[in-house]
Amino acid sequence: MKYVSTRGASSVSPSEAVLQGISPDGGLFVPQAFPNVTGEMEQWKSYTYEELSAKVLSLYFDDFSQQELLNITSKAYTPNFPKGIVPVRQIYGNTNMIELWHGPTLAFKDMALQVLPYLMGHAMDKTGEKRNMLILVATSGDTGKAALEGFSDVVRTSIAVFFPKDGVSAMQRLQMVTQEGANVHVCAVDGNFDDAQTGVKNIFADDAFLQDMEQRNIRLSSANSINWGRLSPQIAYYFHAYFRMQESGQVKAGEGINIVVPTGNFGNILAAYYAMRMGLPVKKLICASNDNSVLADFFKTGKYDAKRDFFKTISPSMDILISSNLERLLYEVSGRDAGKVKELMRSLREGQQYQIDGEMAQQLEQHFYGDWLSEEETRAEIRHVFEQHGYVMDPHTAVGHGVYRRYVEKTGDTTPTAIASTASPYKFPQDVLKALGKEECKDEQQACTVLSELSGLSIPEPLAALSGKPILHSAFCKKDGMREDILAWVGSAHTPIRE
Ligand SMILES: *Cc1c(COP(=O)(O)O)cnc(C)c1O
C-alpha cells in the first residue's frame, strides 16, 4: 500500500506517511486505494475489538506483520479500556450510541492516540530513523490530553501541545496542565484553535526551524488528525458498531445504517466515510456542527466559507472553522484530482473561501447530510434525551443527537442509526448539569459528584484522580510566538529529548 498526497506529491510507504504526518507539498496522505472487505465481514463479526482493529490496520499498513499489529492494538486497548473496548448502546428504537470514550482521557481521541505512539515507534525502526521525534500538537481540547497520555515517557519521542488559552473547558485544561512525563510540554496560546493549528502548520513549513531541529537530531511529526496514523485506527469502530447492531437484530448483513458524527476537524466522520468505501453498508453520513456551522453550510451550498465570526461553545472540540481533513474528502469527490484540490486549498488560504463545482457537490450530496445545533438547542437536547431515555450525553454527542433528531423529523428516514458518542459527560460536568436545569457547582469536582448522583454512573477514575494533582505546566505564548516557545523548551537545561 502506498500513500499519495491530496496535492499530488509522489507516494510514500505506510511507515513514512505516519512519520511525516503531512506531505511535503502541504497535502494530506491518503491510501492509493480502498480495499473492499465485503466478503470478509461475516468473519470479522466474531473478532474481539483488538483483533478487528488489527485486521483493518493490516490492510493499510502492509509493511507491518499481522502479529505486530495485534500486539499494538492489544497494548493500546486491553489495559486502558474496559472489556469490549467500545460499548454500543441501543438507547431507544433503532438509535445507538457508539461510546468511544472509555479510554484514559474520556474522549474518542484515545481510540487513535493510544495506538499512534506504537505505530510511530515501529515506523521509526522500519525506516531506520535515527533521529528522535518531536510531536507538535494543536488542540481544541481533547486531542491535547489524549496525545499527552499516549506519548508520555515514550522513548526517543517528546511532545509539545498548544491549546487556545480560553478555548477549552476547565476540565480539559486541568487534564493537560497536570500531565506528568519527562518528555511533555504544554503551552496556552493567546488565540483560538485555528490560530494554534495555523501556528503548528507554519512551524512545519519553517525551513530555518527544521534545520535547527535537524542539528539537534530531531525530526518533527504531528499527532493531529491529519496524520494517517491518527485516522486509520478510527475506521474499525464503525464496523464494530455495525456488527453489534446486527447482533441486536437491528440490521441484517448488507442492510444500510446511518452514521451520525459530531464534527470538528472532520477526522472522525472521514473514517466513517472510509469504512463505507471499504464496503460497510452506509446510507447517510450525517455531519453535525455547533454554532460554528461552516460544514453544515458547506454541505447545503457547496461553498466553504471560513470568513465568519468564530464562536466559543459548550462543545469546544468542535469550535473549528478550518476543518483540515475535509481536504481528503475533496480529493475523493473530485475523482482524485490533485490539481483541483490544490486550487481549492489555495483559494481557502488566500481568501478563506472556496466553491466546489456541481459534479463534486453531487457526489457529496449522495453520501452526506449536514446540519447544526445552537447552544440553546444543544442544552435542550441534553435535557430531552435524559428525561425521555435516561441517557446522559456530553454536549458534543448532544449536537450529534439533535441534528439526527431533526434529520428524522425532516426526512422520515427510519434507517437504524449509530451516533458517535465522542466524550464522557463527565468531561463537561458543569455544562451538562446546567442543561439539566441544576444549580451551578463551585468546581468541577463537585459537579462530578452531583452528576453521579443524578445519573447513577460512577465518576471515571482518571477524573476522580485529578483533584490531587499538582499543576506542572504554565507556559503561555502569543499566537506568533509558538516557534520561540518550542525553542526555549527544547533548549532548556533539562532537555526532555531522551536517548
Ligand atoms: C475532537 C472531537 C470531536 C470532533 O472530531 P473531529 O474528528 O475533529 O471531527 C467531537 N467531539 C469530541 C468530544 C472531540 O474530542
Image: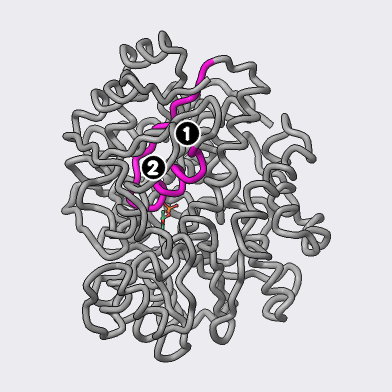
**Observer-nearest residue: 13 or 430?**
430
Q: Are marks 1 and 2 in contact (CB under 8 Å)?
A: yes
Residue 445 position by quadrant: bottom left
Provide the residue designation for mark 2.
324
Name the secondary structure under disc 2.
loop
Where residue 305 appears, as percent x and y from the top left, is 25, 49
Query: Callout 2, which amino acid?
Result: Ser
Provide the residue designation for mark 1.
28
Residue 394 position by quadrant: bottom left
Query: Callout 1, which amino acid?
Result: Leu
Vertical relation: 487 (above or below) 415: above
Q: CA distance from mark 1 to mark 2?
A: 9 Å
Q: Quadrant of the N terminus?
A: top right
Residue count near mark 1 (Cα–Cα under 10 Å), binned few <14, some 14–19, many ≥20:
many
Q: What is the residue that sits farthest to the top in this orientation?
A: 215
Q: What is the residue that sits farthest to the bottom in this orientation?
A: 388
Residue 386 tag number: none
**Magenta stretch contains residue 133:** yes
**Going 57% across and 86% down the picture, which residue do you hit?**
93
Name the secondary structure under disc 1.
loop
Question: Ligand 1 lies in which image quarter?
Answer: bottom left
Dot 1 or dot 2: first in sequence order is: 1
**Magenta stretch contains residue 17:** no
